[in-house]
Image (spheres, rainbow, N blue to C red):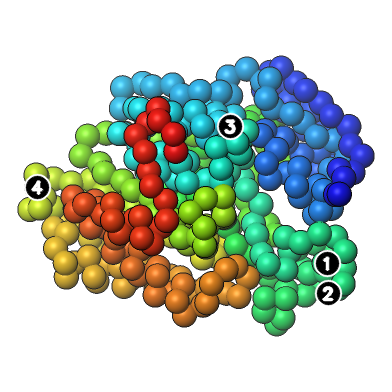
Amino acid sequence: MMRLPLFRYAAPRTLDEAARILAAEGPSAMLLAGGTDLLPNMKRRQQTPAVVVGLRQVEGLHGARWNGGTATLGACTTLTSIVRDARLATQARALWEAAAQIATPHLRNMGTLGGNLCLDTRCNYYDQNYEWRKAIDFCMKKDGAICWVATSSPKCLAVSSTDAAPALVALGARVRLVSAAGVRDLALADLYRNDGIDYLTRRPDEILSDVTFDTGAGWRSTYWKLRRRGAFDFPVLGVAAAARFEGKGRDARVAEARIVLGAVASQPLVATEANTFLAGRTLDDATIETAAERAAALARPMDNTDFGLAWRKRTARAFVTYALRELRGDDQRAVRARYVRHELFAAGSRS
């Protein structure tokens, strides 16, 4: 049995109180929301904070707020709450689909939006118990000096495994970071770095308090996730796609597009070249094929997650194709059931 290390626990009731605790404790303190990522990491001695600051009782960090076509979700909103929100299911489909495919119902009951956005990067050589990692002489991400994925790499190649981040980046989301020194607002895409160790631009004294995004008319979005099992597993590939259309039917033109790849690098990757290519075009088969090829060029899988490298590369292209066909209006349910191995249910029902 793996046991937690000793730590002190703080349970602030306000965001200001939580920020003051972080400022006083410094880097030795870490935030706890649902605990589905931090607590297992602590048991494996990957993270050993002296102080754990619980956010569950902090006012204002829970639930969704709507202001016209803008939605704001508190960072401690549970994934289950997102899945049960019928308005998100229709107006922020990519986020709803991403949340519905995270882990299991029990973990979604505990896990939070903010926790998934700040999820630790993952790697076959890192996500093992202490004794296993010690036996191979540890790795660069924790206690060692070598990246066992690529021994000559100057940086850690652990993979971003958040499902919510690609979906929300595709939706153009922004986040608010609160500290005792003030407040910072930034695009969600700017929260991440392509570095397996230093993967967040959030400072240790900052709290991600909420996420805001527009749900304006004309936008459609979707999220496709690859994993070995149809439940529980972290993504080996995530493809989020969102597009704003002008016109109706299959002749509608893409006014703006956002394709984002997850789980292929240490941060979600925005497919800028493919997004630019799609603007002003209809989603005919040739356009979709070209956009998928340009987006998949970003995927350079490493041997640190599941499945073979060449197959994962090909699957990135295929999943972008499926996502764009779905945005076009094609019925992709049979394809999703075959390859994603997950059936999505209506909001309010089981997921």
From the viewer's side, name the closer residue of 119 and 176: 119
Given the image, on which type of amino acid does mark 2 rest? Ile
Amino acid residing under circle 4 = Gly
User: How far apart are the two marked residues, 1 and 3, measured between alpha carbons?
Assistant: 30 Å
- Disc 1 designates what residue? 132
Residue 109: image tag = 3
Q: Is residue 223 above or below residue 89?
A: below
145 to the left or right of 316: right
Name the foreground residue: 20 vs 278. 278
Residue plotted at (42% across, 51% down):
342
* Residue 266 drawn at (x, y percent): 58, 62
Residue under label 2, please give it. 136
Q: How crowded is mark 1: few (under 14 residues within 10 Å), some or many (20 or more)?
A: some
Q: Distance between the residues labelled 1 and 4?
A: 55 Å
Using the numbered discs, state the Cα–Cα distance from disc 1 to disc 2 in whole angstroms: 7 Å
| Element class at badge 4 | helix
> Mark 1–mark 2 contact, CB under 8 Å?
yes
In the image shown, does 84 or 150 lie closer to the viewer? 84
Give the x, y percent position of residue 187. 47, 44
Q: Name the residue under label 4.
A: 249
* Distance Cα–Cα, label 4 vs label 3: 38 Å
Ranked by sequence position, the earlier of labels 1 and 4 is: 1
Measure the C-alpha gap from mark 4 to mark 2.
56 Å
Residue 39 numbered tag? none
